[in-house]
Amino acid sequence: MAETVTPSDSSRTTGHLLASLDPLLREWLPRQRWFAGKGRPVTGFTLVAATELLPLDGRLGLHHLLLRVHQPSVFGAEPHPGDCYQLLIGVREALPPRLAPALIGHVEDGPLAGHAVYEALYDPRPAEVLLEALRTQARIGGLCFDRDPRQEIREGLVARLMTVEQSNSSVVYGDTFILKLLRRVVPGVNPDLEIPLALAREGCPRVPAPTAWLHAGTDTEPHVLAVLQPFISGASDGWELALRELAKGEDFAAEARELGRATAEVHTALARALPTATLGHAQLRSLADGMTERLAAAVQAVPVLRPYESGLRAAYRALAGLADEGRTWTAQRIHGDLHLGQCLRSPSGAWSLIDFEGEPARPPAERRLPQPPVRDIAGMLRSFDYAAHSASPPAPDWARVCRAAYCSGYAEVTDRDPRTDPVLLRAYETDKAVYEVLYEARHRPEWLPVPLSAIRRLAASALEARP
Ligand SMILES: Nc1ncnc2c1ncn2[C@@H]1O[C@H](COP(=O)(O)OP(=O)(O)O)[C@@H](O)[C@H]1O
Ligand SMILES: O=P(O)(O)O[C@H]1O[C@H](CO)[C@@H](O[C@H]2O[C@H](CO)[C@@H](O)[C@H](O)[C@H]2O)[C@H](O)[C@H]1O
């Protein structure tokens, strides 16, 4: 394993551990839900930083790693230096049976021969080390643990790893806090911290305010690595609730309207808190071009899209046509990957929005650009459709009612009904459905028919709407 940056900790134990990890991680990493490079072999690693958080005292060692993972570039794409991942590696002489699912492998030789290395977040003790470091604002090697001094963090909260499907990894502490440890990390400002902090400054109660955060900074470029927020205890997410109502044959219109109101409140606060922009001819043209390019790339990667390509392009051409007629739109910071799974309803019925990271596959700089808020609306409209088409039998009328109620709720707060922008809305819905086809092909191929059913409808409706 080559080292481009001197590890913060250069102890001999860490050196041996890193050498042993190489073959184990090649096999283990691609099996992780959060690993973004699925489908391409792992050809090697570069160590970006290593920090010993607990020295191996005979029972438990704990290492924080930032590793660049090398893989062949996607066909036709520019050569890529490889994504950087955050790992928390535990070392034990013997792994207790309760930690068996966390095993990465056994060290073959050297002073640690026979020791088990494992995904340490499964283990309450290492996860508690992270909370304690945040509480005390520790500096360990290049790792900076910071917190909002106005929020109290109690000592001794017990940790448990969340087992939901997610793009990162989250640990809950005593039903009081949730720590999201980002897996694929990028340098620079991270919207998952930036936006909740900005909303907290605005006093917007719809998003849990960050309590503490971890970043790396001394011998690497600054990277946000983890964010701690209050845990909304007993909350259900919008996706679970929607599926539950669908299964009972109940409509979801009242909740959809409340979700529309919550989205509108967050958008209003974001427009106050962070810069806005006007999208004129050049920007709208480039928006339509970007959508067309993403479609072309998706057709290459998932050829079942090909029969719909010309219909889908018509949706983007209609947007370019409005740009040519001189139409402009206001852009602002938005959520960027809004769907029912990002909406939490507390036991009292209040909706909160979470996870402002944006679509994991989009370039980080693009995720922070001001965009028309209709893009988030399109994400939610797709989500109602997703729920309705993953039900058996599919329930298109259920989705139609929810979609209308959501837009009405949004309009009640902002005085802007998203349905008054049908061309922009359809272009964004189409772009989202194309993204979903790629996402499902990569992560959950059995779900592919859900976005494909929308692709068929969107292609047909864009062709029908042609002037
Ligand atoms: N503040 C919170 N309170 C309660 N549960 C939360 C909170 N934040 C996140 N969660 C739960 O954790 C899951 C993953 O969080 P999320 O931010 O969406 O992570 P990811 O980016 O990895 O998908 C959510 O689906 C939700 O169930
Ligand atoms: O995990 P993230 O929240 O970062 O988002 C990714 O995964 C989502 C699935 O977990 C994916 O959402 C798609 O499936 C949802 C149902 O599971 C559905 O509600 C969404 O509308 C649909 O887009 C999301 O696109 C992806 O970025």
Image: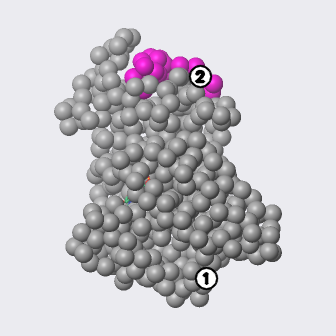
Residue of label 2:
3
Stretch of the chain drawn in magenta:
1-25
Mark 1 and mark 2: Cα distance apart in space: 55 Å
Quarter of the image with the C terminus in it: bottom right
Whether 339 is drawn above or below 136: the answer is: below
Residue 77 percent location from the top left of the image: 65, 36
Whether 325 is drawn above or below 45: the answer is: below
Q: Tell me what residue is drawn at x 49 percent, y 85 percent.
A: 408
Name which residue type carries label 1: Thr
Name which residue type carries label 2: Glu
Q: Tell me what residue is drawn at x 39 percent, y 38 percent.
A: 32
For label 1, the SS is: helix
Can residue 47 be seen from the camera position used here? no
Pick the residue in front: 144 or 240: 240
The image quadrant that residue 387 belongs to is bottom left
Pick the residue in front: 319 or 363: 319
Residue of label 1:
420
Name, please, the residue furthest toward the top.
Answer: 109
Whether 74 is drawn above or below 375: the answer is: above
Is residue 23 found inside the magenta-colored segment of the image?
A: yes
Q: Which dot, 1 or 2, sits closer to the camera?
A: 1
Residue 237 percent location from the top left of the image: 35, 66
For marks 1 and 2 on the same chain, the one whose residue lies earlier in the sequence: 2
Whether 210 is drawn above or below 20: the answer is: below
Label 2 environment density (alpha carbons within 10 Å; few <14, some 14–19, many ≥20): few
